[in-house]
Structure formats: C-alpha cells, structure tokens
Image (cartoon, rainbow, N blue to C red):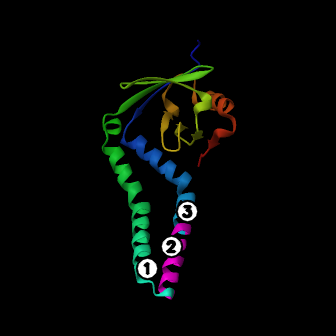
Amino acid sequence: MEILFKNVTTLNKDEYMELVKFHNAKNNFKYYLYTAVMGLILIIGISYQIYLRNYISLTLLALIFIGFLAYRFIEPYRKTEKEIKGEKVQGNLVNTYIFYDKNFVVKNKYGKDTLKYRKLFKVYENDSAFYLYISKEDVFIVEKDKFEIGNSRDFKNFISRKVGYKFKNYKK
C-alpha cells in the first residue's frame, strides 16, 4: 500500500485548548438553545405548581431545575480541566497518522489503530488543523503544518472526497 499522507501531531495543552475553542464555537448555539428550552419547560412547570399550590412538586421541580443548570454550566468546565490534567495532554501525546487510499492508521505509545474513512463521524477544518471525529466527542487532531508526506491543501481535497458531506470547513 502506498502512503499518500503522513502527519505527526503532538497533543499539548495549546492544541487541546484550540480544540475546545473550536468545539465550543461549533456547538454553542445548539447547546445553549437546548439548555434554554429545557430551562423554560422547567420554569413553566414550576409556575404551574405555584398556581396549584403544590409545594412538594414545586420543591422537586426547583431542585431538578437547579441541578440541571448546574450540570449544564459546570460539567463542561470540569470535563475540560480533567482532560487538561490527563496524561494525553500533559504527556504531550504524539500521534502519527498514515493515510492510505482505503484507510488510515493512527499510531502512538498506546498502540496502533486502523480505521476506514466511512467510520469517521465528521471531519472539520479550521485555520490550523483538521479534526477527524470518530464520534461526537472523540477526535483526532491533524495539524496542518505537521505533514511529513503530502501537504494540507492536497489532504483537504483527499479527505473531503473520502468523507463527502461529512466534511465541513470552519475557517475564520
């Protein structure tokens, strides 16, 4: 098999924070819209319980509302802090990506994985990297300036052909 592209990307705190910013910018509207709709539903439920003078249900809904808001606003920060302190970011994990015509290989100190392009959930491009999502949360970061074989312009054409409608450009 002929190697079409090879990229060696080191995951450090700066790269991870770029991913977090990108992910938040991409998903903020949907995230906050869902939070607002659910919050509004809970507020309507609380208001109705006040109208009915049903204080047990009111207390229960108020606790659910507080818990929901706390989870929606605190959990993303807690998760980010946990990832930043984790071994992958602190240890400057080095991923080597080798792209072939039918699949690609990801190698790091934890092992080697071969994936078919159809298994990619989405592929996003911004000014500095390509983000190859294998699920809604799990992503491979391929920095544009780290190609050892091929270049980012040719890789963009290649990966967009391989994944079709799953490719999105988020350049500023």
Q: Tell me which numbered mark, 2 or 3, is placed earlier along the sequence.
A: 3
Q: Answer whether residue 6 is visible to the viewer in this image.
A: no
Q: Position of residue 93 (x, y in %)?
A: 36, 31
Residue 68 occupies quadrant: bottom left
Residues in magenta? 37-51
Q: Nearer the viewer, mark 3 or mark 1?
A: 1
Q: Is residue 16 left or right of residue 149?
A: left
Q: Nearer the viewer, residue 91 or 172?
A: 91
- 79 versus 95 height, above or below: below
Identity of the amino acid at label 3? Tyr
Count of residue discs: 3
| Magenta stretch encompasses residue 133 | no
Image point 53% across, 67% down: which residue?
38
Helix, strand or loop for disc 3: helix
How busy is the neighbourhood of tag 3: few (under 14 within 10 Å), some, or many (20 plus)?
few
Q: Is residue 74 left or right of residue 52?
A: left
Helix, strand or loop for disc 1: helix
Q: Quadrant of the N terminus?
A: top right
- 73 versus 138 height, above or below: below
Q: Are marks 2 and 3 in contact (CB under 8 Å)?
A: no
Q: Nearer the viewer, residue 152 or 52?
A: 52
Per the image, the residue denoted by label 2 is 42
Image point 60% across, 46% down: which residue?
170
State the separation of the CA atoms marked 3 and 1. 22 Å
Q: Which mark is residue 34?
A: 3
Identity of the amino acid at label 1? Leu
Residue 115 occupies quadrant: top right
Q: Tell me which numbered mark, 3 or 1, is placed earlier along the sequence.
A: 3
Per the image, the residue denoted by label 1 is 58
